[in-house]
Structures are given as C-alpha cells and as structure tokens.
C-alpha cells in the first residue's frame, strides 16, 4: 500500500475548501496542495537558485544563471523532479521578465542494448520542455569512446587472492564494450556496482562538457535509504557521507561540482503519485517498469534493499527517514593523500585496503606479521598499480576486463600547465 493513496471524500487539510484526493503520511491533500507540498520540499533544497539583483531597487539580474545538470533516469522520481524544475524556471521567467535562477541541462545515460526508446522519449521531452531545458542522451559504451585508446588498460583480479590485482597496457585492437565487462564479472551485485560507477562517470563528464556547476540527482528519501544499506553491505560504508550528502565534491577526473538531492524529503510513493498527477508517466522508460526478480538467489543486494523498503515505506515511513538522517550525520573520513580508486574514482580512505585484507587473518607471531606488512608500502606506491577502494576490491574479485585510466586531479592540472 503506497504512502500517498486515494482518500475518501474529505476536505483538504491545507486549503480547507477543496475535496481531498490523496492521503500523504495520514494527512489529506487536494491535488493542488499536494503538488505545492512536494514542490515546496524541492525548492527548499534548492533555495540558492534564485534570480539575484544588485543592491538597491531595479536593475538587471546579476550575471548569467548557473548551469545545472539533472541526471534523468526516466523513472517516476526523476521525472517528478524534472516537472518541478520546469515549473520553477517558468515561474521565475514570468516573475522576473524572462530571467531565471538556473540554466537547466537534462542528461540520460541509456543502459539498454537498444537506445531507440530512450532517444525517442528524450526527443518528446525536448519537444515539450525544450524552451526551458537542453536534453542529452549518453550511451554506456561512450565510457570507452570518450577515453583515449592509449588510456585503456586491462584489469586483472585473481580469484584466489583478493589483494592480487594489476593493470597492464591493452594490446587488443577491438574496442571494448560495457557488455564485455559484464560478461566477465561472475556476480550480479558486482555487475550492478560497475554499471553504477560507469553511469556516475558519464553523468559527471557530461556535466563538465556542458559547463555545469551543479548536478541534481532524482533519488528520493526511500532510494537514499536503500543506498545506505546496500552500500554498507557492499563494503562502501566509508563513502556514505560523501556520496549521499548535499555539497561540493571533487572527483578524480573532473572539476569540483555541487551535488544536490532535492527529493531527499520525499518518499518514493509520493514521487510516483506526483508524476501521475502531473502527467509525466508517458515519459517512463519501459525498463523502469519491469519488476525485479522475486527469486532470492537471482536478486542483487540493491534488489533486496528495495524490496525491504517497499514493504515498510507505507506503514513505517519514519524508519526510512531515520536511516537517511542517520547516514547524513556521519562524518566524512580522512582521505589519504588525495588518492582515488582506479575503478569508481572515489577517494581512498586507506592507501592500501588490500594490505588489511591480506593480514586480517594472522597465522604467525605478531613480530613476524609486522615484518611482512612493512614492505607492502613500496608496492602500494607503484604507479603501475593504482589504488582500489575496498568496495571495488571485493566486487571485482575473480574478474578481468578492459578499463580506461581515470586521470587524477594532478593529471588534469598538468595538461593545462604552461
């Protein structure tokens, strides 16, 4: 049973005049108040994106508005956020004589083998809302075409030793594809993890190409709660404060960008109801409507957490809120020397998680163990063996595939140095 449901005939608790159409967290709303209620949450999260004027009365707005990229997955939540942003820009233009507080770019990363449906849907969105947003479609395989051929290397991870991995120059002439990666990763959860890393990389690179300063993610409170549990289960708990919080982030392969989750106070069921009320469902991608497997052994960790929160969201929404708020209180751990994971490009908190994994079980005396651990620092600093975070070490065990070298911040600086 969703949190936002059809209500019996009663007056709206906000305007007290219209008949209620939905019940949200036990409160009746008419359709107009329901839309204003959710849009208000999004606008509070983006309070800085207003039209600003110089001191005094009159005059033109101060400078051009910041360019903002919306990562559109064509799900209910992301489409609901798109409608909120479009309405915000149009209202600002009416109130400020054509000026707006942001310049909107919408980007979709197509994860399907056939991108015709995604491109058709994005063309429909551009036709309907092209006056306020610029639409782009990126294919997963552009992860390789955007990289120089000389930067693509072969990654190998031993199945017998979790700390045994390497990168070597790639000699094959055939261009790699994302499907070739997935075919060589034995675990379903690891496949989903790699796809998420590729998708994030493409969104950030698209934002850099479009000269955007902000990236908006359509994750609802429910989705953020799912990520909190799934990332912890996958060994990425140290990245929670960085990846799930609003604020400025630096990545290994790009400039600093502001990341915002405008729907962090909105439940998934509420976003679904909003998308339906505002007639955004025709833009839904068919793959987002396909139900996940109900067979436990066929489910990924993400599928399991999604099923869990789907069952408790309606009856106990406070649990969802508690998970998200608890994760938001976590402190960002100390990053070791600006080192970034060679797979997911997130900062490595520990310079060598593989060292900890190889010494977690001790079969010798303490003194002998210390002697064995000390020489590992030389191998960790080798440029031929870039660091991997703990989550990628676990996810890629027993896999080998082509992977582009993600440039470090220093590489980017050196490229533009005179």
Image (cartoon, helix red, strand yellow):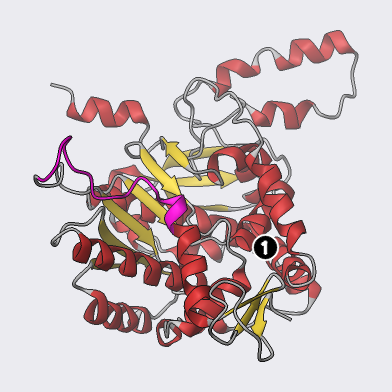
For the view shown, which residue lies furthest in the front direction?
Answer: 17
Image location (x, y in percent) of residue 180: 48, 65
Magenta stretch: give its range: 43-58
User: In which image quadrant can residue 84 be found?
Assistant: bottom left
* x 39%, y 48%: residue: 47
Image location (x, y in percent) of residue 95: 22, 62
Q: Which residue is mark 1?
A: 302
Q: Is residue 132 left or right of residue 201?
A: left
* Residue 321 vertical position relative to residue 156 in the rendered view, above or below: below
Q: Is residue 245 left or right of residue 65?
A: right
Q: Nearer the viewer, residue 363 or 355?
A: 355
Q: Find numbered disc 1 in the image and state the secondary structure of the residue it sits on.
A: helix
Image location (x, y in percent) of residue 119: 31, 79
Q: Is residue 352 left or right of residue 359?
A: left
* x 38%, y 72%: residue: 83
For the view shown, which residue lies furthest in the bottom direction?
Answer: 9
Membership of 54 in magenta stretch: yes
Membership of 110 in magenta stretch: no
Tally of marks: 1
Q: Nearer the viewer, residue 53 or 141?
A: 53
């Amino acid at each position: 049973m969703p949190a936002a449901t059809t209500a019996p005939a009663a007056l709206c608790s906000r305007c007290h005049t219209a008949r209620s159409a939905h019940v949200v967290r036990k409160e009746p709303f008419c359709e107009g108040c329901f839309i204003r209620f959710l849009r208000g949450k999004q606008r509070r999260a983006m309070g800085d994106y207003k039209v600003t004027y110089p001191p005094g009365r009159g005059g033109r707005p101060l400078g051009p508005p910041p360019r903002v990229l919306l990562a559109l997955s064509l799900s209910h939540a992301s489409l609901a956020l798109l409608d909120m942003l479009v309405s915000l820009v149009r209202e600002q233009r009416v109130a400020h004589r054509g000026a707006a507080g942001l310049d909107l770019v919408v980007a979709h990363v197509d994860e399907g083998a056939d991108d015709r449906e995604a491109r058709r849907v994005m063309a429909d969105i551009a036709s309907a809302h092209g006056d306020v947003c610029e639409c782009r479609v990126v294919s997963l395989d552009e992860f390789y075409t955007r990289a120089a051929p000389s930067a693509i290397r072969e990654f190998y991870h031993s199945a017998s030793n979790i700390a045994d991995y390497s990168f070597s120059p790639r000699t094959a002439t055939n261009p790699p594809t994302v499907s070739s990666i997935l075919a060589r990763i034995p675990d379903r959860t690891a496949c989903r993890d790699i796809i998420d890393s590729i998708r994030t990389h493409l969104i950030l690179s698209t934002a850099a190409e479009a000269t955007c300063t902000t990236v908006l993610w359509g994750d609802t409170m429910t989705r953020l709660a799912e990520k909190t549990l799934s990332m912890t289960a996958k060994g990425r708990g140290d990245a929670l404060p960085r990846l799930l919080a609003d604020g400025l982030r630096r990545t290994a392969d790009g400039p600093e960008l502001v990341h915002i989750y405008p729907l962090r106070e909105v439940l998934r069921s509420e976003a679904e109801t909003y998308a339906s009320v505002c007639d955004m469902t025709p833009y839904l991608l068919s793959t987002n409507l396909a139900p996940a497997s109900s067979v436990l052994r066929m489910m990924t960790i993400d599928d399991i957490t999604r099923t869990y929160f789907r069952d408790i969201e309606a009856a106990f929404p406070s649990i969802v809120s508690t998970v998200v708020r608890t994760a938001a209180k976590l402190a960002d751990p100390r990053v070791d020397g600006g080192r970034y994971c060679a797979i997911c490009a997130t900062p490595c908190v520990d310079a060598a998680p593989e060292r900890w994994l190889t010494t977690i079980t001790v079969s010798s005396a303490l003194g002998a163990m210390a002697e064995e651990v000390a020489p590992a620092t030389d191998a960790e600093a080798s440029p031929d063996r870039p660091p991997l975070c703990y989550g990628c070490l676990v996810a890629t065990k027993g896999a080998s595939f082509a992977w582009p070298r993600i440039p470090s911040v220093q590489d980017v600086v050196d490229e533009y140095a005179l």
